[in-house]
């Protein structure tokens, strides 16, 4: 046993120090980034925010809405090949959207997943000339040797695909995945809003430090990282980018919207207020379900129950209904743009170079709330 006593940081443990800036307005800040990849020989340009591949967030509806802002969506893995075909070849083009540059196909690594991936790549083979194809290979624990081998195999069979793989939280495994064939490494174990991994297993890594360390390792190999999980407010998204994340993946912040494909549920409750007849006033609350992909809820829905040998590592929550996602996305982009103006970064690309984090004492966190 060994104890690493170096302090590791979460988003809530830091703030970004303002710097002299000659920017006049946040509207001057360019939120798009252009990337090259270590393996796929393509260039991509867009807003590097990705809706998480959860079945309550990574939907076709979300993909359409986010594509309208040049941002991306990792589709959840429970769509059928027919669904993909309809979306990629009819629905998205009819909505004036190029789905290829704005959408990840997501898969796990079981046999069925690998079969589904091969089928999806047949559809991708017919994409318009010059369009990229994005694959998200997602496992809870990216440290298994088998995972690295599968990444390697998929890289060999799909040379031109942009492959994002994870999740990991340390530099050496980030390097391993990039060497195995990943272009983007997904970073985060345990920070998710509906994740219970840290409670159930004691495993995890404070997310900002994970992003800093993995980004450093990835960039040394010309690879990229995606900070996945733990952002609860636009300032957290800014801190992830400032810490070196090339992409940021969001679950909870994009949940609760029309595009989540969930049922809007209504709860009525008695308040302590009285009406003119001295009757207790009844109020209504609208909400949507949001749950972790390894929660009991997800397991029951997609696999008919939780396997005996495993415990659920996710939970179900109710998110107040928030209408369309456009407003939320504008708020997130507005927040990050504003961060850039505070540190004098003319573009998102410059944000991390111009960032100095200051650590915030635990006491202050407690006085002012967690974020
Ligand atoms: P959020 O943005 O909600 O904080 O985090 C979203 C991320 O949480 C997802 O992209 C995924 O990596 C992770 N996640 C989703 N469902 C589960 C789950 O059931 N268990 C765990 N451990 N992580 C989850």
Image (tube, grey):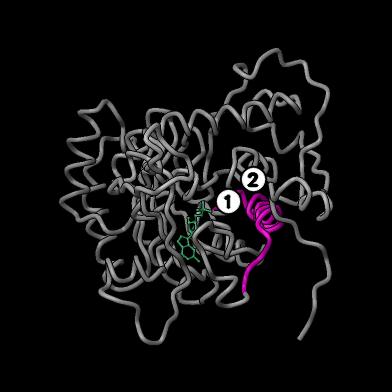
Q: Which quadrant of the structure image shows residue 171?
A: bottom right
Circles 2, 1 touching at the beta carbon (< 8 Å): yes
Query: Residue 255 placed where, x, y %?
Result: 42, 46
69 with respect to 365 (left or right): left
The residue tagged 1 is 227
Under 8 Å from ligand 1: the CB of mark 2?
no
Q: Position of residue 220 (x, y in %)?
A: 68, 52
x, y (%) of residue 358? Answer: 83, 44
Is the CB of mark 1 within 8 Å of ligand 1? no
Question: In the shown orientation, is residue 267 left or right of residue 231?
Answer: left
The one nearer the camera, 301 or 369, is: 369
Q: Quadrant of residue 176?
A: bottom right
Look at the image and say whether residue 367 sits in the magenta stretch. no
| Residue underneath mark 2 | 240
Q: Helix or strand or loop: what does disc 2 sit on?
A: helix
Whether residue 368 sits left or right of residue 207 in the image: it is right
Q: Does the rendering let one see residue 180? A: yes
Instruction: Kindly identify the residue that appears in the image at 19 percent across and 54 percent down.
Output: 81
Q: Which residues are magenta?
A: 203-228
């Amino acid at each position: 046993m060994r104890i690493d006593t170096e302090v590791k940081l979460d988003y809530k443990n830091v703030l970004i120090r303002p710097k002299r800036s000659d920017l006049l307005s946040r509207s001057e800040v360019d939120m798009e980034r252009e990337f090259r990849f270590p393996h796929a020989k393509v260039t991509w340009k867009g807003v590097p925010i990705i809706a998480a591949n959860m079945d309550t967030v990574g939907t076709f509806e979300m993909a359409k809405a986010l594509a309208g802002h040049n941002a991306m969506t990792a589709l959840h893995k429970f769509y059928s090949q027919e669904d993909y075909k309809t979306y990629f070849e009819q629905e998205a083009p009819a909505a004036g959207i190029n789905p290829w540059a704005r959408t990840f196909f997501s898969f796990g690594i079981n046999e069925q997943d690998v079969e589904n991936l091969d089928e999806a790549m047949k559809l991708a083979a017919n994409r318009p000339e010059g369009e990229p194809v994005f694959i998200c290979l997602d496992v809870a624990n990216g440290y298994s040797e088998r995972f690295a081998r599968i990444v390697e195999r998929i890289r060999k069979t799909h040379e031109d695909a942009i492959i994002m793989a994870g999740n990991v939280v340390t530099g050496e495994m980030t390097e391993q995945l990039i060497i195995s064939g990943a272009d983007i490494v997904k970073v985060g174990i345990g920070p998710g809003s509906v994740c219970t991994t840290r409670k159930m297993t004691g495993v995890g890594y404070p997310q900002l430090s994970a992003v800093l360390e993995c980004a450093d390792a990835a960039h040394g190999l010309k690879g990229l990282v995606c900070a996945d999980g733990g952002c609860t407010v636009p300032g957290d998204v800014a801190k992830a980018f400032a810490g070196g994340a090339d992409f940021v993946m969001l679950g909870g912040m994009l949940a609760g919207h029309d595009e989540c494909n969930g049922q809007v549920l209504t709860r009525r409750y008695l308040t302590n207020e009285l009406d003119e007849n001295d009757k207790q006033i009844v109020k209504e609350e609208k909400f949507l379900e949001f749950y972790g992909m390894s929660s009991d809820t997800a397991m029951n829905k997609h696999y008919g129950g939780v396997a005996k040998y495993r415990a659920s590592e996710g939970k179900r929550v109710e998110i107040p209904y928030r209408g369309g996602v456009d407003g939320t996305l504008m708020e997130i982009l507005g927040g990050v743009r504003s961060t850039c103006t505070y540190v004098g970064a003319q573009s998102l690309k410059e944000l991390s170079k111009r960032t100095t984090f200051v650590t915030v004492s635990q006491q202050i966190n407690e006085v002012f709330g967690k974020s």
